[in-house]
Image: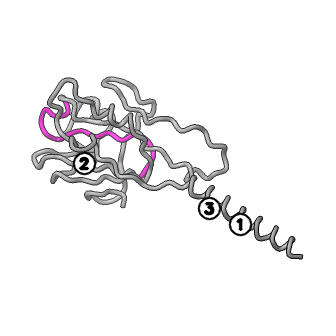
Amino acid sequence: MAGAAFRAVVFSLLGAATFFVGSSSASWHAQVFVVGGEPRGWRKPTAPNEESYNHWAARNRFHVGDFLHFKYEKNDSVLVVTRGDYQLCAADKPTLRFEGGDTRFHLNHSGYCYFISGAPGHCDAGQRMTLRAMVPQQQDGGNNPAAPARAPAAMSPGGEDDEGGTFEPPGARSSTPGV
């Protein structure tokens, strides 16, 4: 009888350990990305060999729920624009406009997002970025076999992004839309 009880305890512990290890490896937590990295932040490029914001974005993997932390000068701004306005560096009718030097932007939907600077000449000088936010694996319903996640696509100047969508988040204009 003691042997059966011992085996039941061992199997229960193994089952619990498997559950906790499996659930912790499948969990995902929102991240905060400082756009451009520290200490650079969001600013007009000053050197021709400086990493572009699209290259920086391509090195990261963004998910719905993550935050982009834009750190910039008070005389600059962050504009969320359509794909067409991104390609033209057109700042006259942004979807969202952020000012003040410190903005946390909530990625609240999957797909492409387009950002440009609102300061004259900054976008043309390279202060612009496009990125793709993906749905974290545990949010996909779990019914389909998991396909390997694609790296986020950064659009090169004049390139195609294969979706052509626009970013129009719901809710009021604030420093953290969608929250």
- Label total for image: 3
Q: CA distance from mark 3 to mark 1?
A: 11 Å
Q: Residue at x 13, y 32 (%)?
A: 121
Say which quarter of the image contains residue 13. bottom right
Q: Is residue 114 magenta?
A: yes
Instruction: Decide: few, some or many residues near mark 3? Use Cα within 10 Å; few <14, some 14-19, many ≥20.
Output: few
Q: Which callout, 2 or 3, points to the residue nearer the camera? A: 3
Amino acid bearing label 2: Phe
Mark 1 or 2 closer to N-term? 1
Amino acid bearing label 3: Phe
Q: Residue at x 28, y 50 (%)?
A: 69
Instruction: Decide: few, some or many residues near mark 2? Use Cα within 10 Å; few <14, some 14-19, many ≥20.
Output: many
Residue under pointer 3: 20
Which of the two residues, 150 or 18, is positioned nearer the viewer here? 18
The magenta segment is 108-124
Say which quarter of the image contains residue 115. top left
Residue under pointer 2: 70
Q: Is residue 116 magenta?
A: yes
- On the rendered structure, is 135 left or right of 176? right
Instruction: Decide: few, some or many residues near mark 1? Use Cα within 10 Å; few <14, some 14-19, many ≥20.
Output: few
Q: How is the image coloured?
A: one colour
Q: Residue furthest left?
A: 75
Residue under pointer 1: 13
Q: Position of residue 23 (x, y in %)?
A: 60, 58
Q: Quadrant of the C terminus?
A: bottom left
Which of the two residues, 131 or 164, is positioned nearer the viewer here? 131
Q: CA distance from mark 1 to mark 2?
A: 46 Å
Mark 3 or 1 closer to N-term? 1
- On the rendered structure, is 78 left or right of 5? left
